[in-house]
Image: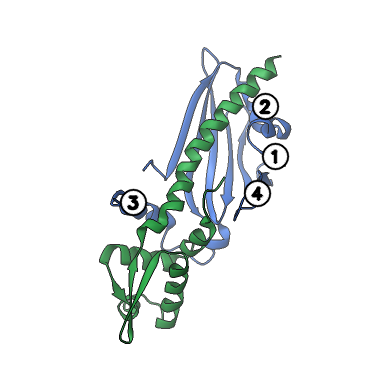
Chain colours: A blue, B green
Amino acid sequence: MTTTRSLVIEKEMPHPLEKVWRALTQGALIKEWLMDNDFQPVVGHKFTFRSTPVANWNGVIDCEVLAVEPNQKLSYSWGSLGLGSVVVWTLVATEGGTLVRMEQSGFRPDQEAAYKGANYGWRKFIGGLERVVAGLP
Amino acid sequence: MMRTAPDVLFKSLADPTRRALFERLSRDGEQTVRMLTNNSGVSQPAVSKHLGVLKHAGLVRARHRGRQTHYTAQPRALAPLVDWMSYYSRFWHDRFDHLENLLKRMDQ
């Protein structure tokens, strides 16, 4: 089983920082490579990503912008099917272009589930889950 | 996007009491409702109700013996959850490729 608590993907792309930033933060461009959306690069803005609905999933991902640091860092919450996580994009200029880093972390119950009082944390559970799954034949 | 019907599974595990019950059954093996109620800080009817939800999600199996019901964890039922997480690894790798394609097109 791959690590579940944090997923990191990093890639150097031969394009300038400002251009990558535009692709990450302009709704029409985001739609081209990720999903249809009503994103705005404004902290606190609530938006959705929408993909094709399938059985038992309406295709909607509920998000809120958490951080916008132009050409450096973009972060939003990412919630679907009762599980929430946080996506953080970090851009670093390199000689050949831009190092693009995406981290999705903190898989946890979203607010709807969390208000009940998460004294028994999902994070802890995921740790237990890894052990349980590792023991499966 | 999703392979099976994970929403029932996710909803059942979104509750901390149910996660605690499931983990306890995974760790300690088969137990009765009474054993699970002891030290749980939750009433027996509440524990029974939670176990019903876990059973509906396929996470526990009930075995009736006399007047007691014994519960065991069914960790294989977690598979959709594991899939959901590894799903994102594939998902983002694909999207990185799409992003690069878009960046190339933006040059033209």
Q: In the rendered structure, which disc, 2 or 4, sits on the residue that comes first in sequence?
A: 2
> Real-space Cα distance between discs 1 and 2?
16 Å
Amino acid residing under circle 3: Val
Q: Which residue is mark 2?
A: A22
Amino acid residing under circle 2: Arg
Q: In the rendered structure, which disc, 3 or 1, sits on the residue that comes first in sequence?
A: 1
Please identify, in this view, whether the residue under mark 2 or under mark 3 is nearer the observer: 3
Residue A75: % across, % down: 58, 39
Residue B48: % across, % down: 42, 78
Say above or below: A88 vs B84. Answer: above
Q: Are marks 1 and 2 on the same chain?
A: yes
Q: Secondary structure at mark 3?
A: helix
Read off the chain for label 4.
Answer: A
Q: Which residue is mark 4?
A: A53
> Real-space Cα distance between discs 3 and 4?
29 Å
Question: Which labelled disc corresponds to residue A36?
Answer: 1
Q: In the rendered structure, which disc, 1 or 2, sits on the residue that comes first in sequence?
A: 2
